[in-house]
Amino acid sequence: MNVLEKYSLAGRVAVVTGASQGLGRGYAAGLAEAGAVVVCCARSVEGLRSAAVEIAAKGGRAEAVALDVTRYEETGKIFEKIRDKYGSLDILVNNAGTEEVADFVDVTPEQYDKIMDVNLKGAFFTAQAAARIMKTRKKGKILNIGSLGSAIGLSGSSVYCGTKGGVLQMTRAMAIELAPYNIQVNALGPGYFRTPMTEPFFQDPAHRKWIEERIPAGRAGTVEDLLGAVIFLCGDASGYLTGQILYVDGGWLAS
Ligand SMILES: NC(=O)c1ccc[n+]([C@@H]2O[C@H](COP(=O)([O-])OP(=O)(O)OC[C@H]3O[C@@H](n4cnc5c(N)ncnc54)[C@H](OP(=O)(O)O)[C@@H]3O)[C@@H](O)[C@H]2O)c1
């Protein structure tokens, strides 16, 4: 196989959770551009439909499917329907996530559960549902989404950091169990990207300055900055790479 062909996702079926807005929406567009049929999942059907329409307008193939990653028992059935419709489920970008900034001493059990249920338990059972299908096919790619919070502590984000540290550890454990089935499980660790989730940080001049001062590249990222890593980690080019996290952070963690 020509080396560039290893970056093509032609003929692959990809599911992206949290594709109604923000980074997930960008990943969906990038995967479609690389040739995959993309199933865009989230709770907001309106956001998903516009994401799918945008992809189709650029010549890609995409479908919107409502999915709440905290309805753990439903995910498997939804993924089986996708497999039955398209003939396979090759790639999962396990991106749905949430955050609620609060000082550690003020976090309530309700806030804790809300963030854990989506970011960690939701990601866990979404990956499990995909892996059950991929295992029978002996091929697959699962890309979990970590964060700088997988590696360092972020003030006001104690629960979020707990979930993202957990995402990294579960990535490693999933990877070793699934490696014999030719399923690679890796994580992407984005630095700071301006999305609806992070908009309040960028709106606050002091917080924005704090972020930008810590990025050696001198700017926050855009989703295009992540697509090279996403396509690599979802394609044949990363066929012998598993259980790793790739930080795309403009140099933050190196500094
Ligand atoms: N932005 C950054 O700088 C940054 C940095 C590091 C890591 N990340 C991670 O990247 C991922 C995306 O972040 P983002 O910044 O793009 O956030 P965002 O703009 O808030 O988007 C979050 C996405 O997750 C979906 N979602 C939330 N709860 C869900 C649920 N229960 N079921 C299904 N989908 C759900 C949302 O859609 P609905 O509301 O329609 O369900 C939305 O599409 C998250 O895992 C986040 O932790 C982001």
Image (cartoon, helix red, strand yellow):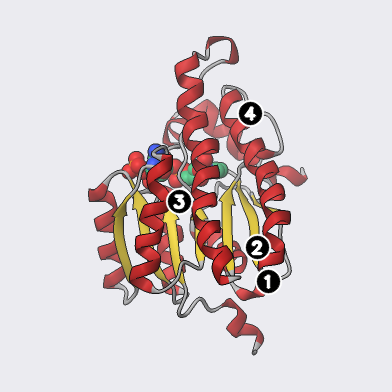
Q: Is mark 1 within 8 Å of ligand 1?
A: no
Q: Secondary structure at mark 1?
A: loop
Q: Amino acid at mark 4?
A: Leu
Residue 184, disc: 2
Circle nearer the viewer, 2 or 4: 2
The reply to whether callout 1 and callout 2 are in contact (CB within 8 Å) is yes
Please name the amino acid that badge 3 sits on.
Leu
Label 4: how many residues lie within 10 Å, few (<14), some (14-19) or many (20+)?
few
**Sequence-first tag of 4 and 1:** 4
Q: Marks 1 and 3: CB-CB under 8 Å?
A: no
Direction top: furthest residue: 105
Q: Which of these two is toward me, 238 or 204?
A: 238
**Pointer 2 local density, CA inside 10 Å: few below 14, some 14–19, many at least 20:** many
Q: Position of residue 253 (x, y in %)?
A: 73, 43
Alpha-carbon span between mark 2 and mark 3: 21 Å
**Residue sitting nearer the eye, 75 or 54:** 75
Q: Nearer the viewer, mark 1 or mark 3?
A: 1
Marks 1/3: CA–CA distance: 24 Å
